[in-house]
Image (cartoon, rainbow, N blue to C red):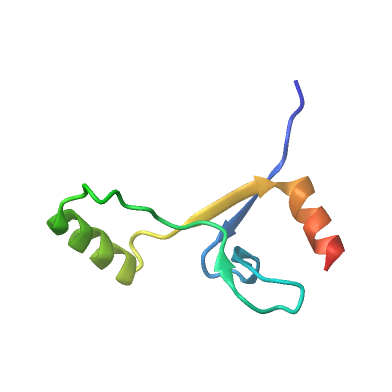
């Protein structure tokens, strides 16, 4: 079974944002998606957590994929 090394990208790191070949259109690699069924008061708590930095998005990818991406830049 192959073993992979993982690269963790945090929301405040430059590589967390995906961009097109011109370096434009930053799109986060990871985000949060709340169900429309999520109660409003829960959404407010989650929003407060994000605004205060208590809840942060993180993306994980194979280190080899990250290296190939960097070589392609």
In this view of the protein, which residue sits in the foreground, 54 or 73? Answer: 73
Question: From what the image shows, is residue 24 above or below residue 54?
Answer: below
**Is residue 69 rendered to the left or right of residue 13?**
right
Residue 54 visible in the shown view? yes
- Find the residue positioned furthest to the left: 41
- In percent of width and height, residue 68 lies at 83, 54
| Residue name at image x 77 percent, y 26 percent | 2
Q: How many marks?
A: 0
Residue 52 visible in the shown view? no
**Is residue 60 rendered to the left or right of residue 73?**
left
Tell me which corner region of the image, top left, top right, bottom left or bottom right, holds residue 27: bottom right
Task: Assign the C terminus to one quadrant of the image.
Answer: bottom right
Question: From what the image shows, is residue 51 above or below residue 7?
Answer: below
| Residue name at image x 60 percent, y 64 percent | 16
In this view of the protein, which residue sits in the foreground, 3 or 69? Answer: 69
Tell me which corner region of the image, top left, top right, bottom left or bottom right, holds residue 13: bottom right
Task: Assign the N terminus to one quadrant of the image.
Answer: top right
């Amino acid at each position: 079974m192959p073993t992979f090394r993982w690269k963790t990208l945090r929301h405040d790191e430059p590589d967390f944002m995906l961009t097109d070949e011109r370096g434009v259109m930053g799109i986060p690699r990871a985000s949060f998606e709340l169900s429309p069924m999520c109660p409003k008061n829960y959404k407010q708590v989650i929003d407060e957590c994000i605004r205060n930095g208590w809840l942060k998005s993180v993306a994980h990818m194979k280190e080899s994929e990250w290296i190939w991406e960097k070589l392609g830049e």
